[in-house]
Image: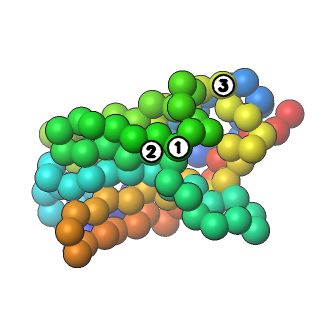
Amino acid sequence: QVQLVESGGGLVQPGGSLRLSCAASGSTFSTYVMGWYRQAPGKQRELVADITSIGSTDYADSVKGRFTISRDNTKDTVYLQMNSLKSEDTAVYYCNIRRIRTSYWGQGTQVTVSS
């Protein structure tokens, strides 16, 4: 059974940093695309960033230059380093891993940016 366990969310002041982690278990995921999505209250879930098995990355325009996604295939873990956080980054962040016809989601971790 595949499980994704996220950690690292919390409350941070504007301009601060957080690092999210998502550890996958139940299979091997080196060939999967791994990514982070977020959903703010009253808004649709949106892609924040993702990374392919060979390390190619894609970012939402709103986080380019501030967020960095990375992965450790030896640990089946994906990370999201978030710097220069803004109030509009407040959301529940979800880990996702996927390949053709298969997609798994984490339970979500709350990130709140507020003074």
Left or right of 53 in this view: 36: right
Left or right of 55 in this view: 39: right
Quick one: SS at disc 1?
loop
Quick one: SS at disc 2?
strand
Q: Amino acid at mark 1?
A: Ala
CA gap, disc 3 to disc 1?
A: 15 Å
Q: Nearer the viewer, residue 7 or 112?
A: 112
> In the orientation shown, which residue stands out farthest toward the front?
61
Q: Reading the chain from its start, which is encountered first: label 2 or label 3?
A: 2
Q: Amino acid at mark 2?
A: Ala
Q: Is residue 96 above or below residue 112?
A: below
Are the residues flagged by discs 2 and 3 in contact, CB closer than 8 Å?
no
Marker disc for residue 92:
none
Report the quarter where the C terminus lies: top right
Quick one: SS at disc 3?
loop
Q: Residues within 10 Å of mark 3 (few under 14, many from 20)?
A: some
The residue wearing badge 2 is 49
Location of residue 100 by image quarter: bottom left
Q: Reading the chain from its start, which is encountered first: label 1 or label 2?
A: 2
Marker disc for residue 60:
1
Of circles 1 and 2, the one toward us is 1
Image location (x, y in percent) of residue 75: 21, 42
Q: How many labels were placed on the picture? A: 3
CA gap, disc 1 to disc 2?
A: 6 Å
Marker disc for residue 84:
3
Left or right of 12 in this view: 9: left
Q: Residues within 10 Å of mark 1 (few under 14, many from 20)?
A: few
Left or right of 67 in this view: 10: right
Are the residues flagged by discs 1 and 2 in contact, CB closer than 8 Å?
yes
Identify the residue at image location x=78%, y=40%. 87
